[in-house]
Amino acid sequence: MEGGEERVPLLEVKNNIENGEDGERLGLKDRTWIESKKLWKIVGPAIFSRVVSYSMNVITQAFAGHLGDLELAAMSIANTVVVGFNFGLMLGMASALETLCGQAFGAKKYPMLGVYMQRSWIVLSMCAVLLLPMYFFATPILELLGQPSDLAALAGTISIWFIPLHFSFAFVFPLQRFLQCQLKNNVIAVVSSVALLVHIFVTWLFVSQLKLGIIGATLTLNFSWWVNVLLLYGYVSCGGCPLSWKGFSMEAFSGLWEFVKLSAASGVMLCLENWYYRILLLLTGNLKNAEVAVDALSVCMGINGWQMMIPFAFFAGTGVRVANELGAGNGKSARFATIVSVVTSTIIGFFFCIIVMLLRDKVALIFTSSTIVLDAVDSLSVLLGFTILLNSVQPVLSGVAVGSGWQSLVAYVNIGTYYLIGIPVGMLMGWVFNLGVMGIWGGMIGGTAVQTILLAFITIRCDWDKEALKATTRMAESR
């Protein structure tokens, strides 16, 4: 004390200004620059690690495509429908950690992060066991969904070999979110790079040298994803997170029901999004000349999925930034983080939309050399461009929902817009108006547009101070 005034450390004053308590003192340009640095600290490594991880899938699919058109279609169906169904659900359930770990990190309750991750391992492992029948009965399920018998049979065989990959999801997703919420995305990026190098070598060995064909291509993904799991766990358990990892704890078994409810809401929210365009591939399999249509669409979805790693990184970054600020009680900073993230991702999405429309079928050469498939991809390029643009906004708004804990509300929005609007309109345009795959995809883009508008409305109408109070109350009651 001096002159009756309390001294405040300069670092604390700086943090207060940057975190929004005195943020209004800064101009918009300075505030945007500060927030962008915080956001890109998460998003930059997240983009890299997601692109690297997705590239493993692209490499496998590309090798399958050069084995033959049936192999490409079967790998696409197995990867998109069977594995993709479970991937979406378990990824969504793991995103509950973005809410809980993100808010706990913002509230400086570091030991709870390790407890939350262990709860997620328990819940996701149980979920993985319950989902096993989808792999064992993939062939009859795909035939029931209208897929040709030869395509369904090969896809079913591939699905059985994907079971080890399925169980890796239960561990790798919680590990990634645990590290992500502590701003350790660089670790995830490095581990992903190592896994990619391993994947390239193993794919070359199994497919090119040992000539194991489509099964060999499948085995490479299993191997590479488990390398990812073991390296991330090794980092965490060997002292990489001394504040948040205190070893295994029986506390992980307490509060499981509340965790299950939030995980289930997160799983429903994200898997409804994840399944949406996967259903497009299934519907296309029922059209005439299904093999060519599925190949062309799988190529487009591969390109879209590759680019989607950028919005998904913004999804992660926005979720962490919003959760951190709400956990620290800074509602205005959470709102500003949302604005910066949405604008940045939209600009990037617009750039890639233009690139795809200009290159058209050229990027498809990565996946196939078939002239028929390349021509089909060319005809779908405009729809692919619009999909990329819309998907640059929607995941970011979903990230806001995850950071704020709105998963249940967004799940209802997704059901209404995707499954009561998008798919019925797509089927109407595809079959009744005979527009084929373009009609199905066009209708489903309409569903995505409606969903994006509703999420934007919910976000704009949000009372951020109230959300900050709810987050700090949750952290105060956590155990």
Image (cartoon, grey):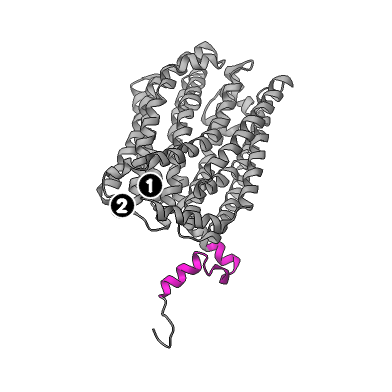
Residue lying at the far bottom in this picture: please name it.
3
Measured Cα–Cα span from mark 2 to mark 1: 10 Å
In the picture, the disc for residue 241 is 2
Q: Secondary structure at mark 1?
A: helix
In the picture, the disc for residue 129 is none
Report if residue 19 lies within the magenta region. yes
Q: Is residue 436 left or right of residue 132?
A: right
Q: Residue at x 44, y 34 (%)?
A: 90
Spot occupied by residue 221 in the image (x, y as percentages of width and height): 39, 30
Q: Residue at x 52, y 11 (%)?
A: 149
Which of the 4 quarters of the picture holds residue 277? Answer: top right
Which of the 4 quarters of the picture holds residue 385? Answer: top right
> At label 1, which amino acid type do we have?
Phe
Compared with 237, 142 (above or below) is: above
Q: Residues within 10 Å of mark 1 (few under 14, many from 20)?
A: many
Q: Residue at x 60, y 65 (%)?
A: 28
Query: Which range of residues does the magenta coloring cover?
Result: 9-33
Compared with 476, 397 (above or below) is: above
> At label 2, which amino acid type do we have?
Cys
Q: Secondary structure at mark 2?
A: loop
Spot occupied by residue 281 in the image (x, y as percentages of width and height): 57, 25
Spot occupied by residue 270 in the image (x, y as percentages of width and height): 52, 37
In the picture, the disc for residue 178 is 1
Badges 2 and 1: C-beta atoms under 8 Å apart?
Answer: yes
Residue lying at the far top in this picture: please name it.
149
Spot occupied by residue 87 in the image (x, y as percentages of width and height): 45, 32
